Image (spheres, rainbow, N blue to C red):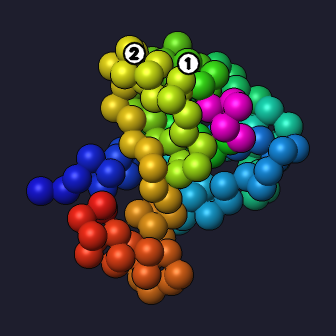
Amino acid sequence: MPSNYESFWNRSSYAVVGHSAKESFPKITYGELRKAGKKVFAVDPSAKVIEGEKAYPDLASLPEKVEAVVIETPKEETRDWVAKAADAGITSVWIHMGCETPEALELARKKALNVCYGTCAVMYVVPGFSFHSIHKWISKLIGKY
């Protein structure tokens, strides 16, 4: 049976949230979801275009509702993006490792969101052998996949 972390990637539509003015946009996650045939929208309040596609300033601006959101923003923004996801009716949230905060996780619990955190999204979305597959193998070995 797949873990909650593995099942997160079985949805058909995603928003990937970053803030390019403060740190690099999560282009690997965004690109791999697109390669996998998922409908994916870039959300970035500081960019108009990501990887040649329109970027949206927030979740409320998306042309349609998505099933899940991946948050890879500076820590100080994470809680606000969790709140925006809940307000948009998105119930599945991935908070990229290093972006989670106690406040964001508490809000996710209060809003009854399915939240994944504490690990790298890329090790789940990149198929085949890569640096991230080594990370995946180690995580499986120690029971944290």
Q: Would you say 60 lies left or right of 89 here?
A: right
Identify the residue at image location x=37%, y=22%: 109
Q: Which x, y percent locates residue 137?
A: 34, 78
Is residue 28 or residue 123 the one in the foreground?
A: 123
Q: Circle 2 sits on which residue?
A: 111
Is residue 24 or residue 135 the one in the foreground?
A: 135
Above or below residue 118? Residue 124 is below
Q: Which x, y percent locates residue 31?
A: 61, 62
Q: Would you say 59 lies left or right of 45 here?
A: left
Would you say the magenta stretch is mainly helix, strand or loop?
Answer: helix
Q: Circle 1 sits on which residue?
A: 83
On-image quarter of the N terminus: bottom left
On-image quarter of the C terminus: bottom left
Above or below residue 38? Residue 47 is above
Is residue 121 or residue 33 the one in the foreground?
A: 121
Q: Would you say 11 lies left or right of 130 here?
A: left
Report how far apart the C-alphas of labels 2 and 1 lie in the structure.
Answer: 8 Å
Q: Which x, y percent locates residue 95?
A: 51, 42
Q: Helix, strand, or loop for circle 2?
A: loop
Marks 2/1 in contact by CB < 8 Å: the verdict is yes
- Identify residue type, mark 1: Ala
Task: Point out the stretch of residues depicted in magenta.
Answer: 74-78
Question: Magenta segment: does it hold 77?
Answer: yes
- Identify residue type, mark 2: Lys
Residue 84 placement: quadrant: top right
Q: Can residue 55 be seen in this view?
A: no
Q: Helix, strand, or loop for circle 1?
A: helix
Q: Is residue 116 visible?
A: yes
Identify the residue at image location x=37%, y=52%: 9
10 Å crowding of disc 2: few (<14), some (14-19), many (20+)? some
Q: Which x, y percent locates residue 48?
A: 85, 40
Residue 144 placement: quadrant: bottom left
